[in-house]
Image: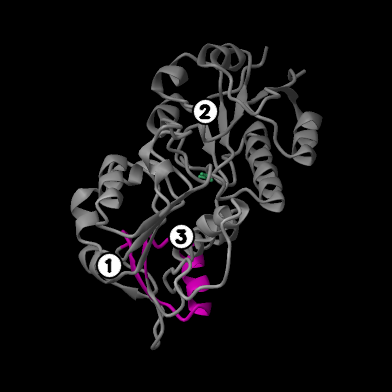
Amino acid sequence: MERERRIFVTRPIAQPALRRLAQAARVELWDDDLPPAHDELLRALARADAVLSTVSDRLDAGTIAALPHLVAISNLAVGVDNIDLEAATRAGIAVGHTPGVLTETTADLAFALMMAVARRVVEADQFVKAGKWRTWTPRLMLGRDVWGATLGIIGWGAIGQAVARRAAGFGMRVLYVSRKTAEEIATGPSAPQRVDLARLLAESDFISLHVPLTEATRHMIGAPELAAMKQTAIIVNTARGSVIDHAALTAALQKGRIAGAGLDVTETEPISHDDVLLKLPCVVITPHIGSASVATRLRMAELAVDNLLDVFAGRIPRCCANPNVKLRSLQTS
Ligand code: GLV
């Protein structure tokens, strides 16, 4: 008889999905919002056939090499930059992820950050709560218009396009850059316009990042790109922190080279409490919550479980980041 499959779940996930997983396998749950220490993770993974991981679990080549029995990594995220994909593929480990189900929720947050920085929502809230609101004055908390402005979207995947749909409702002109060579481009007077990066940087009032973190996109926004932006521009990052060179961004904001930033992701997470960015009123930072709605986190957990069950049924996960992997065989004893 086939022995029961063992899964290590590295963080508490939505209960219905966890219950479904527990019906199909023996689940060991790390029941804490803080991640297990690396040696703890390794110990748990040595006992497991598969892992349901999160973006804050680093599954690098060394870790993967130490786990000869692992057959699947199911990441509760669309991004898989926390996993060495090549090492996993070489080892015959399928890497599942959760695209699609989080698109609209993440686009909502990108828009929320853009609006928050442009209209100084966080600053204004803190002003009122600090008892500083004395009267209406024509000069109080002047921000920048989002409506009618030019939005530059870097990365024309599902989330970038979802942001563009929201922008249409605000009467924005949308420019975008895309790595894809051939794709359908909408036409019409207010359709998003594909441009090169230099033009997008020069013309955009708001710039929103929607690229995965790879060696090609690491620090793709550095000092030269920041210098090429309008002095009134606001940059929003809901992708990965390291797409922006943090030191260059800090310098650009401090010198007033650009007007503001809305960041859901930072180069180190969590960002250090004494980081200068935290002191700048023109910066709004949220703790990597792009997909954090109740409904979306449930959908992500269900999909992450489906991806694992696919592997236990001998299939490549339905949402697989390395679909060409040759699956290694499951242990039978
Ligand atoms: C979250 O950051 C994700 O990649 O889904």
Q: On the image, numbered disc 2 is attached to which residue?
A: 57
Crowd tier of the residue under label 1, counting other residues whose Cα lies within 10 Å: few below 14, some 14–19, many 20 or above:
many
Q: What residue is drawn where x is 26% and y is 64%?
A: 231
Under 8 Å from ligand 1: the CB of mark 3?
A: no
Amino acid type of disc 1? Leu
Res 117 label = 3
Camera-nearest residue between 245 and 320: 245
Q: CA distance from mark 3 to mark 1?
A: 20 Å
Amino acid type of disc 2? Asp
Q: What residue is drawn where x is 56% and y is 61%?
A: 108
Under 8 Å from ligand 1: the CB of mark 1?
A: no
Q: What residue is drawn where x is 62% and y is 34%?
A: 311
Amino acid type of disc 3? Val
| First along the sequence among labels 3 and 2 | 2
Res 200 label = 1
Magenta span: 151-180
Does the segment drawn in magenta span residue 175?
yes
Circles 3, 1 touching at the beta carbon (< 8 Å): no
Camera-nearest residue between 164 and 149: 149
**Which quadrant of the structure image shows residue 259?**
bottom left
Crowd tier of the residue under label 3, counting other residues whose Cα lies within 10 Å: few below 14, some 14–19, many 20 or above:
many
User: Residue 240 in the image: x percent, y percent?
Assistant: 42, 44
Q: Is residue 292 left or right of residue 92?
A: right
Q: CA distance from mark 3 to mark 2?
A: 30 Å
Crowd tier of the residue under label 2, counting other residues whose Cα lies within 10 Å: few below 14, some 14–19, many 20 or above:
some
| First along the sequence among labels 3 and 1 | 3
Secondary element at tag 2: loop
Query: Which mark's residue is nearer the viewer, 3 or 2?
Result: 3
Secondary element at tag 3: helix
